[in-house]
Image (cartoon, grey):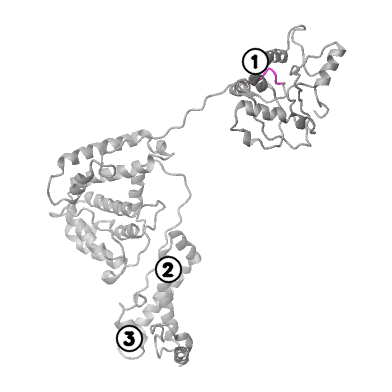
């Protein structure tokens, strides 16, 4: 009575303007005990359909802690109770609809349980089999989630019984994989159940070739053939899922042509998947890809000869129309895996100008200091902290004479620098790094970089870094300690700031 009064007031209010007459008191006279039962079935059907529309990850998230199983068991028990207590005629309007008009509302039908797939265990990519075979292996396990079946198809269990009944003349009622057909058909139609993202045509194709391959491997009784068995299966599956167009792709194909068609389909998928993949070489170990390519070439050649010029063969019609084009029906392309260029092995040497405390440099780094133009500066340590290396010259007393009167290595280097062109001489000078950002100079040529560095010398000389900066009048990069006091004094006047080193 309360619900009736509320709806009457709503209908008479201005809020009702524009609202359709469908929003009315659905079940007049529904008593207090029957209402929660009707609500349980309504809620479960809504939750079931909503969760199934989401991705499998969301399904698992919703159903944690056994929530979905608990709700399903409640809905199933409520449905049983309503079936027992609702009269077949007369009485409440809800019971009348529930018993006599189950097709009017899906919630009046037996509740179906949610079957969320388990989360896959994290693992490295399996490259032991080609990508197409990985999909067939998954289909062998039945990868699809539950689907909402419509019309007279009933639920998945009822549809499985129908399939076995149609296949019994061929021995199909004893095939152990029949229960996988419906789950995989759900995957083909709705794309839920596998990590791989496939297009509609790819999913339809994999389901078709998986199903045909399973049938071909069975011992078909009587005079049955592949096409004779495929027909009834698709007949039961078609129109069982709303909006699904996964149909029998090649209804009249024979066993031999089917196998060749499957070979072309698989190779085209593998080629498309691996051609630009960084893991191509991992998949193609032990000659797997070459063997598959050779088999595909052979199948293509046979189809080119065997497909009749005319006839009722849908596959051959497709093949003849497209065999000169790229794609599934075209000339197979050989897979060429990308390879990374080998990195040269560099032997580490110690530069003559390096001291024992300095890091080793590779040959390419050493040569680059002479041949690549002025060095590019890299960000240095904090300005307040001394750097561990001297830039070019060493503190007083740090250099050693070789053989008494012989030239030191740094002196030889200075002579070579003096004889080199200007850009090369500038490249041999080491400079203390600063925190300034020199990214903009990376694309400039050597002369531009050299001039940039030269223009900043006065600024760097005034910093707190213990850098060794030279004026235009160059001195050797590593002077020997001499006995002549005036000579040493002149050298000190040219060098700046060892006090922080």
Q: Mark 2 to mark 3: distance in Å?
A: 27 Å
Vertical placement of residue 27 versus 485, above or below? below
Which residue matches tag 3? 96
**Magenta includes 285?**
no
First in sequence: mark 3 vs mark 1: 3
- Residue 358, image x and y in percent? 70, 25
**Does any portion of residue 84 appear in the rendered image?**
yes
Q: Mark 3 to mark 1: distance in Å?
A: 105 Å
**The N terminus: image quadrant:** bottom left
Q: Mark 1 to mark 2: distance in Å?
A: 78 Å
Closest to the camera, between mark 2 and mark 3, is: 2
First in sequence: mark 1 vs mark 2: 2
Within-10-Å neighbours for mark 1: few <14, some 14–19, many 20+: some
Q: Nearer the viewer, residue 156 or 54?
A: 54
**Does any portion of residue 171 appear in the rendered image?**
no
Within-10-Å neighbours for mark 2: few <14, some 14–19, many 20+: few
Which residue matches tag 2? 50
- Residue 397, image x and y in percent? 81, 18
Query: In the image as oriented, which residue stretches furthest toward the right?
Result: 485
First in sequence: mark 2 vs mark 3: 2
Q: Horizontally, is 210 left or right of 79 in the view?
A: left
Q: Secondary structure at mark 1?
A: loop
């Amino acid at each position: 009575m309360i619900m009736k009064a509320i709806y009457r007031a709503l209908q008479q209010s201005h809020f009702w303007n524009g609202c359709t007459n469908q929003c009315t008191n659905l079940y007049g006279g529904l008593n207090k005990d029957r209402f929660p039962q009707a609500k349980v079935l309504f809620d479960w059907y809504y939750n079931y359909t909503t969760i199934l529309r989401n991705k499998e990850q969301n399904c698992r998230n919703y159903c944690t802690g056994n929530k979905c199983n608990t709700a399903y068991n409640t809905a199933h028990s409520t449905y049983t109770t309503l079936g027992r207590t609702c009269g077949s005629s007369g009485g409440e309007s809800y019971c009348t609809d529930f018993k006599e008009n189950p097709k009017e509302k899906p919630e009046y039908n037996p509740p179906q349980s949610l079957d969320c797939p388990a989360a896959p265990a994290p693992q490295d990519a399996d490259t032991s089999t080609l990508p197409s075979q990985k999909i067939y292996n998954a289909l062998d396990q039945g990868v699809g989630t539950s689907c909402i079946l419509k019309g007279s198809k009933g639920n998945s269990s009822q549809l499985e019984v129908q399939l076995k009944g149609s296949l019994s003349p061929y021995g199909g009622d004893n095939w152990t994989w029949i229960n996988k057909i419906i789950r995989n058909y759900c995957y083909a139609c709705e794309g839920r159940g596998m990590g791989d993202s496939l297009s509609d045509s790819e999913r339809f194709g994999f389901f078709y070739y998986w199903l045909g391959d399973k049938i071909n491997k069975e011992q078909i009784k009587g005079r049955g053939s592949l096409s004779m068995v495929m027909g009834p299966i698709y007949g039961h599956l078609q129109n069982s899922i709303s909006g699904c167009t996964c149909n029998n792709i090649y209804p009249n194909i024979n066993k031999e042509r089917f196998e060749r068609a499957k070979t072309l389909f698989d190779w085209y998928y593998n080629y498309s998947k691996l051609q630009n993949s960084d893991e191509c070489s991992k998949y193609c170990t032990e000659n797997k890809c070459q063997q598959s390519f050779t088999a595909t070439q052979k199948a293509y050649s046979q189809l080119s000869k065997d497909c009749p010029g005319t006839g009722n063969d849908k596959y051959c019609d497709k093949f003849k129309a497209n065999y000169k084009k790229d794609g599934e029906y075209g000339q197979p392309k050989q897979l060429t895996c990308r390879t990374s260029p080998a990195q040269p092995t560099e032997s580490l040497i110690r530069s003559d100008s390096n001291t024992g405390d300095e890091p080793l440099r590779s040959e390419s780094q050493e040569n680059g200091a002479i041949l690549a133009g002025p060095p590019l500066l890299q960000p240095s340590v904090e300005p307040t902290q001394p750097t561990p290396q001297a830039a070019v010259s060493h503190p007083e007393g740090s250099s050693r004479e070789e053989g008494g009167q012989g030239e030191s290595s740094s002196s030889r280097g200075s002579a070579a620098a003096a004889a080199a062109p200007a850009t090369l001489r500038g490249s041999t000078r080491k400079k203390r790094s600063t925190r300034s950002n020199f990214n903009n100079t990376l694309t400039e040529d050597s002369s531009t970089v050299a001039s940039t560095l030269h223009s900043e010398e006065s600024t760097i000389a005034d910093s707190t870094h213990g850098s060794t900066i030279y004026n235009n009048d160059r001195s050797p990069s590593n002077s020997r300690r001499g006995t002549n006091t005036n000579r040493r004094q002149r050298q000190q006047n040219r060098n700046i700031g060892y006090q922080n080193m």
